[in-house]
Amino acid sequence: MKIVEVEAIPFAIPYRKPLRFASGEVHVADHVLVRVRTDDGVVGVAEAPPRPYTYGETQASIVAVVDKLFAPELLGLSLLEREVVHARMNRTVGNPAAKAAVDMAIWDALGRTLGVSVSQLLGGFTDRMRVSHMVGFASDAEMVTETERVRDTYGISVFKVKVGRRPVELDVGACRALREALGPDVELYVDGNRGWTPSEAARALRAMADLDLTLSEELCPADDVLGRRWLTAQTSVPTVADESATTPGEVTRELLGGAATAISIKTARSGFTTSQRILHQCEGLGVEVVMGNQIDGQVGTACTVAFGAAHRSSSRRAGELSNFLDMSDDLLTEPLEISGGELVVRPGPGIGVEIDPDKLARYRQD
Ligand code: MUC
Ligand code: MG
């Protein structure tokens, strides 16, 4: 079970349709595949999606930090020494997606070594999650058409609508058009990616008070400390902290500061190990969680559903598991399939995915 190699392989797969949101846009999945090999010949994999506009990481920075800083520190450690792995990686600040991918590739290798599913190792609560789909910026008509197509094709009935544009009326109009087109049976919630000021957010939420929004995520920046507290205190829609709450310490700060009432957990930035700490922290505090999406490919989505389904509290809400559908291709031998609005955890050891060597050869950038 000793780690003998840690690889960071950059790859790029174009999106058929870009995702646009208040802090950025994605046209190409320029991610990094992390592979951890052991002396038994087992290989664990995970995917790091760089989000420079959220965490400052790039594809090149992820490759560099894994190759130059993490890999030399991890060689020779056992897959069971994950606390040591984290202590060593945490000598480097930041780099959440790089650390998360190393963590999850180690868990995948552990599951494969033991011949068991990582989802069962983590908790084994259920084998599936309901799926929530993120809807990016477009005209009202395009957003409605996309949402209806996703509902009709995959049975998805939960949608996270990107907001945070200026003027706020653009987003209020889009959310209203979606509610009118989709009717009352569909769940809608919003994510501002820090696009609004607290007063803009308060105004928008008042204007959407009749739309039955179930969550409002990261409407304004974490540095708007008093403004976020003011906003959260006056709205009846639960406030989700996403990019402001990526570590247990940040989760404490956002919740105790009154800036959030729920937490988005993303395995793409906190792996399995730290995500489980955050989940248990939220359970102890009586705070709801939602399994978020860092615009993951299929490897990343397999990780999110493995984690989300593993625990009662992370599987209650629909998980954000569907944006890989907009990619033109992916790396797996067998693609993930969403049907009836659900995604099932891959059976089989580890996270249950196999990388197609031909696809990796086609898309790798090194
Ligand atoms: C989200 O929930 O914010 C957009 C940027 C990012 O890092 O994640 C996505 C989705
Ligand atoms: Mg978000």
Image (cartoon, rainbow, N blue to C red):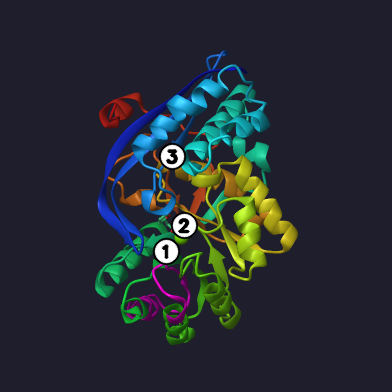
Secondary element at tag 2: loop
Residue pointed to by mark 3: 48
Distance from disc 2 to disc 3, alpha carbons, whole Å, reads: 28 Å
Q: Answer yes or no: do the residues labelled 1 and 3 have beta carbons within 8 Å?
A: no
Marking on residue 309 = none
* Image quarter of residue 257: bottom right
Question: What kind of residue is marked 2?
Answer: Gly
In the rendered structure, which segment of residues is drawn in magenta?
A: 173-199
Where's residue 83, x and y in %? Answer: 67, 32
Residue situated furthest right in the rendering: 284
**Mark 1 beta carbon near ligand 1 (under 8 Å):** yes
Question: What kind of residue is marked 1?
Answer: Asn
What residue appears at the point 57 percent right and 76 percent down from the top-left corner?
Answer: 232
Q: Quadrant of the N terminus?
A: top right
Residue pointed to by mark 1: 193
> 157 left or right of 282?
left
Please tell me whether residue 29 is drawn above or below residue 315 in the rendered image.
above
Please tell me whether residue 311 is drawn above or below residue 136 in the rendered image.
above
